Amino acid sequence: MKTTILITGASGFIGSHLVDEALQYDWEVYAGVRSTSSKAYLTDPHIHFIELDFSSPQKLEVQLDELITSMGGFDYVIHNAGITFATRKEDFYAVNAQYTKHLVQALHAKSLPRKKFVLISSLAVFGPGNATTFQPIQLNDIPAPISTYAKSKWQGEQMVRSLDSFPYLILNPTAVYGPRDRDFLGLVKMVKLGLEISIGRYRQMISLIYVKDLARAVMAAAQSNHLQRAFIVSDGHSYDKNRLAEMVKHFLHRRTWRITVPLFLFRMVVIAIDRIYALAGTQPFLNEEKVKEISSANWLCEGEEIWKELNITPQFNLKTGLGETLKWYQDQKWI
Ligand SMILES: NC(=O)c1ccc[n+]([C@@H]2O[C@H](COP(=O)([O-])OP(=O)(O)OC[C@H]3O[C@@H](n4cnc5c(N)ncnc54)[C@H](OP(=O)(O)O)[C@@H]3O)[C@@H](O)[C@H]2O)c1
């Protein structure tokens, strides 16, 4: 019988790359989607689609029973579905924490997955590193998430850890970039317009991971002997925040006009907008806690361990990953 893998959140940026990577194996690949999900990146005819209802553990158990009868259940489950933006704080906890709890409880009750459950968490759960020493964030640092998103991802991790003898592995990727990503697109579009807007004049260091390297690491980690532990995932390099815009400029052959907005001014405007949205019970994309997160000086992380333990190396650095990403944006006419 063929190995079976379920990838949740398969329609999204990272999820669709995970599906692409899994399709390289001679496995049966199940893409967890919603009825409303786009299948634009899930066109391979070998993909099996399933819609799981994460809102109820009971419904999930019924769905798993049906799947066990029809296809035998899963060897691997990669739980990647999650939200990185929400207009209501409670939605972060519902999707990133409660839905994760429902899924792991239902799987555990059915003795699934047979081999491994991989949770795609985030580096954000640790909170930013020391802004004076610029010591990279380490796996044994005490998590100190500062945004609701990061707190909800940390809760999701705790749900997974709380189950006895559950074959889990947690991955904490740093910021991910690559084809199909829209978060990074804003910066690229701005550079294309000849603008480089930076917030504050402080030094900011970040770690990054190219989405195809992340997908390779996820699949290798799933098949490794590592169990009931976590790994941080980055390409192992340190990047100055200004380096990104400089490289985009270089690739697009653009000269830019740099505008530096003082951090206090930026923060004041965001706080004002945040308060106005709060009156309506929602929150804007850029809110007070998001500013705290994106303006933190140190998002460097330890990036060697996972590659060493899995005996593989990242195939992309920022230059090659960015080159491929920008070419894809151009081919898709996103820029
Ligand atoms: N992007 C990064 O830099 C980064 C860094 C670290 C960790 N992560 C984590 O990686 C995962 C994927 O992120 P992404 O950047 O690929 O985001 P994305 O493109 O927005 O994809 C999110 C996926 O989750 C699905 N999803 C959202 N809410 C759901 C719900 N209520 N029920 C079922 N499925 C739901 C989405 O389905 P629809 O298509 O139907 O909306 C989509 O397939 C997340 O768990 C995120 O926390 C991302």
Image (spheres, rainbow, N blue to C red):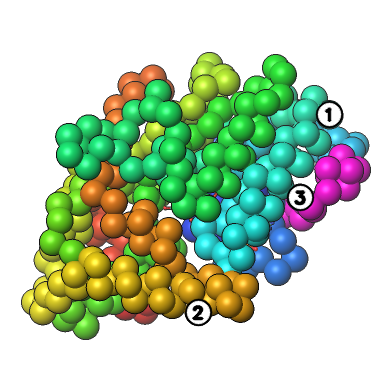
Callout 2 secondary element? helix
Quadrant location, the N terminus: top right
Residue range corresponding to the magenta coloring: 44-62
Q: Is residue 43 visible?
A: no
Callout 3 secondary element? loop
Disc 2 target residue: 276
Between 2 and 214, which is closer to the camera in this rendering?
A: 214
Quadrant location, the C terminus: bottom left
Expressed as whole percent of the image width and height from the top left, the position of residue 303 reads 30, 32
Q: Quadrant of residue 235?
A: top left
Between 258 and 322, which is closer to the camera in this rendering?
A: 258
User: Alpha-carbon neighbours of circle 2 within 10 Å: few (<14), some, or many (≥20)?
Assistant: some
Disc 1 target residue: 109
| Circle 2/circle 3 CB separation < 8 Å | no
Expressed as whole percent of the image width and height from the top left, the position of residue 325 reads 32, 61
Disc 3 target residue: 54
Question: What's the residue type where badge 3 is placed?
Answer: Phe
Residue at 41% in and 76% down? 272
Q: In 3D space, how far apart are the residues under numbered discs 2 and 3 (Cα atoms)?
A: 32 Å
| Left or right: residue 214 compared with residue 240 | right
